[in-house]
Every structure is written in structure tokens, then in C-alpha cells.
């Protein structure tokens, strides 16, 4: 039984994802706590209900796909959601969702609001291991012969025994899942999205990067080997990156290390990759080569947005220099407008007058909340107004008697 989850802001794109027609059939679920008649409206309603919460990711998208070895797919999904809502305290939270039918197999998506009526936010910390534990219980109860392998098996068994589910824990231990080598996913969720977006096979890219690494003895040789394979090495924000044919950057330390681990089980340390590449002068990712190839370090540093960790045009002045950074890419003593350094930005914000801080907060609040706040303030002022000549409100506006509404 496989499950996945992601927190986010919600939106129409999420609803359209649940309705996409690549499935043989899409069955929209009866929502809980929502009144909109269609899925797009329901997701919008979930977002609106979450405006009072102190989070910028109020929506929790979860999906579950029972294993083919489970004959009662519908029953397994019902049991999973029951245990899942108990585990995360979501039993009374609004949700919307859909069931996807593809090649005769069903899996279910649900989108929950994480903001409670009080404004508190549901804690979904360590959600991967907690969902895995719920899935193991369902697999055991629905007769799967073996549990799905998980890198959290030992931790799951420990918690199951604490919860009194010794039967599930013993079943997992008897299967050998707690002593087996931890499985490593071929692609992370982010890498899977990158592969789908670019069409570049990441396994092939890793193999090419590893071959270039092993046939070279130094950084310059590594760059030449990459270029013979249609790849390039540039400077990214977190270090050197391998750039594929679509222009997508892949962190070199992670790419080479993952390739070696998949090839023979021995990972090349990130420190070893950085050491080999330390002496190279690389063009920042996002900049173009000139007619003669890579530019020199001085040219890169002088170009708009040049230098380590910058894309084209990032903070360059009219002469091409990056005023707020030193030659090594560190922040200088003065900011872009001549103020203090970036490290003092928070102190400057805190030192602002209370009225100025409130105005800044209001500018970034959604328009609907601004309107509601203004209406509430008008109502309070209408009840408590006292004429005080010469005084102003918190925004600096003269205090005048508000218009009486009939």
C-alpha cells in the first residue's frame, strides 16, 4: 500500500490535477464540511476557510493506492482514511477529493484543510513515517502476505508495540523488513517532477555524469568529458551544477554521488567532488558563453549578476558590478540602496514605528481580509468615537466622527 502527501497553498491547479482526463474514470467524492457543488469550488472553499490560520501552506493533499494483493480495495481505502484521520487529528476537518480509476485499479486523493476553526494548524510533522505506519496496519488487517518495504520499518515496529499492536509488529519482524537493507527510491518526488517536465531521463544523466567523473582525473578533465556528452558544468547557488540539454541544472555533488551509489553501492562523497572542482572558474548558471567559450573569472565577476551563486542580471549596477557583494560573492557592508548590510535588515524592520509596521503587514494581507479588517475597525470606531482635537489614528489620519450608517 503506497501513500503520498504534500502541503501547499491549494488553488485551481490542484483541483484540475484531480480531474485530469488521463484516467479511465474520475469519481468526485462527496465533500465534508463544504458547500460548493464542484471540485474546483470545493478546493477554493478549503483555501478560504484557512485564511485565519497562521500558515502559508494550509492545504494537505494526500493520496493512497492499495496494493494489488489486497482484494478489497474499497474496504482498504476506508480503513486507511479512518486510521489516518485518527493519527493526524483530521476527523472533523473539511476535505474534498476524487477517486481515480486507471487500468482497472483505484486510488484515492483527498485534500484537507489544516486550519481548525480556532485558527490552530494541524501538526503533520514526520508525516511520511506516520502514514507508513497506518499503511502497515491496513496491509496486515487485509491479508497481505508481506509488508511493503520501508526505510522506517524499525521505527514503525517500535511505535506499534507502544500502541499495543504487537500482532502487526510481529508480522513485520517475521517478514525480515526490519533487518533488510533500507530501500532507496530511484527518484525523489522533486526529481520525478523534473524528469516529467524536461523529458530528460535522470538515470541516463547520472550514468553520463559518473562516466565523465571516472574517466577524468581533475576538474578540467571532468568538464571536457561532460561536454563530449552534451552536458556542461556551471556555478549554481549551492555549488557546481551539471546542466543538461534543456538547460536544467543538477547539483554536481548529488548527481555524481547518487550515480555511484546506484552503480556499485559506494557513494562518492560530496567533499571529494567539491575538492576536485575547487580550482575551476565556472560561468554562473543562466549566463551565456562568448564566441571563445567560457569567460574568465574577471569577466564573470564584472558581468551583471556574475560571480558565484548568481544568475544573469542579479543586482548588477549600470557598470556591471554587483554593488552589494564582494568579489567572493559575500554580502558587502552596504545594500543596494546604500543602507546597512543584509544582516541588519531584520533590525531595521523591528526598529520601524508601530504604525509603519502595521501598514506593511496590511499591504501583504489578502484584499478580502483588508476589507474585513477595515469594516471591523469602522464598527469599533463608530461605537467608541470620542472627539479629540488634533489627534490622529494609527495610520496618521485625523480622527473625525465616522459616518453613521442606517
Image (cartoon, grey):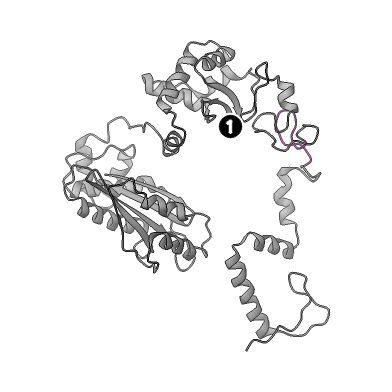
- Which stretch did the figure color magenta? 323-334
Q: In this view, does 59 lie to the left or right of 26?
A: right
Q: Could you tell me which residue is drawn at 42 percent across and 20 percent down?
A: 207
Q: In this view, does 327 lie to the left or right of 65?
A: right
The outermost residue toward the right is 390
Q: Is residue 323 visible?
A: yes
The image position of residue 15, as x and y in percent, is 41, 54
Q: Is residue 196 left or right of residue 100?
A: right
The outermost residue toward the bottom is 406
Image quarter of the C terminus: bottom right
Q: Which of 331 and 151 is in front in this view?
A: 331
Please give the residue where the numbered disc 1 appears in the rendered image: 238
Decide: is 245 above or below 337: above
Q: Can residue 167 be seen in this view?
A: no
Q: Could you tell me which residue is drawn at 69 percent across and 37 percent down?
A: 314
Decide: is 227 above or below 162: above
Image quarter of the N terminus: top left
Could you tell me what secondary structure mostly forms the magenta stretch? loop
Q: Which of 105 and 157 is in front in this view?
A: 105
The image position of residue 41, as x and y in percent, is 43, 63
Decide: is 346 above or below 222: below
Q: Could you tell me which residue is drawn at 44 percent across and 38 percent down?
A: 193
Q: Could you tell me which residue is drawn at 71 percent across and 21 percent down?
A: 297
The image position of residue 288, as x and y in percent, is 65, 26
Mark 1 is surrounded, within 10 Å at the Cα level, by few (under 14), some (14 to 19) or many (20 or more) other residues, namely few
**Image quarter of residue 372:** bottom right
Q: In this view, does 162 lie to the left or right of 367?
A: left
For mark 1, give the secondary structure.
loop
Q: Nearer the viewer, residue 119 or 5?
A: 5
Magenta highlight on residue 20: no
Amino acid at each position: 500500500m503506497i501513500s503520498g502527501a504534500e502541503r501547499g497553498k491549494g488553488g485551481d491547479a490542484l483541483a484540475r490535477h484531480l480531474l485530469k482526463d488521463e484516467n479511465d474514470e474520475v469519481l468526485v467524492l462527496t465533500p465534508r464540511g463544504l458547500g460548493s457543488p464542484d471540485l474546483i469550488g470545493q478546493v477554493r472553499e478549503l483555501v478560504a476557510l484557512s485564511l485565519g490560520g497562521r500558515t502559508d501552506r494550509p492545504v494537505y493533499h494526500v493520496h493512497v493506492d492499495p496494493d494489488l494483493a489486497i482484494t478489497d480495495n474499497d474496504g482498504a481505502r476506508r480503513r486507511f482514511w479512518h486510521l489516518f484521520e485518527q493519527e493526524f487529528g483530521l476527523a472533523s476537518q473539511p476535505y474534498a477529493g476524487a477517486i481515480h480509476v486507471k487500468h482497472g485499479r483505484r486510488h484515492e486523493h483527498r485534500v484537507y484543510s489544516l486550519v481548525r476553526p480556532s485558527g490552530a494548524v494541524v501538526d503533520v510533522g514526520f508525516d511520511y513515517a506516520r502514514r507508513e505506519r497506518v499503511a502497515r496496519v491496513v496491509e496486515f488487517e487485509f491479508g497481505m502476505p508481506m509488508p511493503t518495504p520501508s526505510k522506517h520499518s524499525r521505527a514503525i515496529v517500535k511505535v506499534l508495540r507502544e500502541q499495543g499492536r504487537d500482532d502487526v509488529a510481529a508480522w513485520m519482524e517475521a517478514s525480515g523488513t526490519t533487518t533488510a537493507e533500507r530501500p532507496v527510491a530511484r527518484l525523489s518526488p522533486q526529481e520525478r517532477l523534473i524528469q516529467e517536465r524536461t523529458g530528460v531521463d535522470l538515470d541516463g544523466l547520472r550514468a553520463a555524469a559518473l562516466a565523465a567523473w571516472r574517466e577524468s582525473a581533475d576538474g578540467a578533465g571532468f568538464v571536457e568529458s561532460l561536454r563530449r556528452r552534451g552536458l556542461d558544468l556551471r556555478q549554481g547557488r549551492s555549488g557546481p551544477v551539471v546542466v543538461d540539454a534543456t538547460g536544467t541544472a543538477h547539483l554536481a555533488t548529488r548527481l555524481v554521488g547518487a550515480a555511484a551509489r546506484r552503480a556499485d553501492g559506494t557513494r562518492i562523497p560530496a567533499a571529494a567532488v567539491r575538492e576536485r572542482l575547487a580550482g575551476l572558474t565556472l560561468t554562473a548558471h543562466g549566463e551565456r558563453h562568448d564566441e571563445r567559450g567560457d569567460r574568465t573569472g574577471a569577466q564573470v565577476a564584472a558581468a551583471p549578476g556574475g560571480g558565484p551563486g548568481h544568475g544573469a542580471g542579479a543586482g548588477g549596477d549600470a557598470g556591471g558590478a554587483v554593488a552589494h557583494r564582494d568579489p567572493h560573492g559575500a554580502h558587502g557592508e552596504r545594500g543596494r540602496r546604500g543602507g546597512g548590510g543584509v544582516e541588519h535588515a531584520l533590525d531595521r524592520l523591528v526598529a520601524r514605528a508601530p504604525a509603519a509596521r502595521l501598514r506593511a503587514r496590511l499591504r501583504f494581507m489578502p484584499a478580502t481580509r483588508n476589507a474585513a479588517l477595515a469594516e471591523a475597525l469602522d464598527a469599533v470606531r463608530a461605537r467608541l468615537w470620542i472627539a479629540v482635537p488634533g489627534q490622529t489614528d494609527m495610520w496618521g489620519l485625523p480622527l473625525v466622527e465616522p459616518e453613521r450608517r442606517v
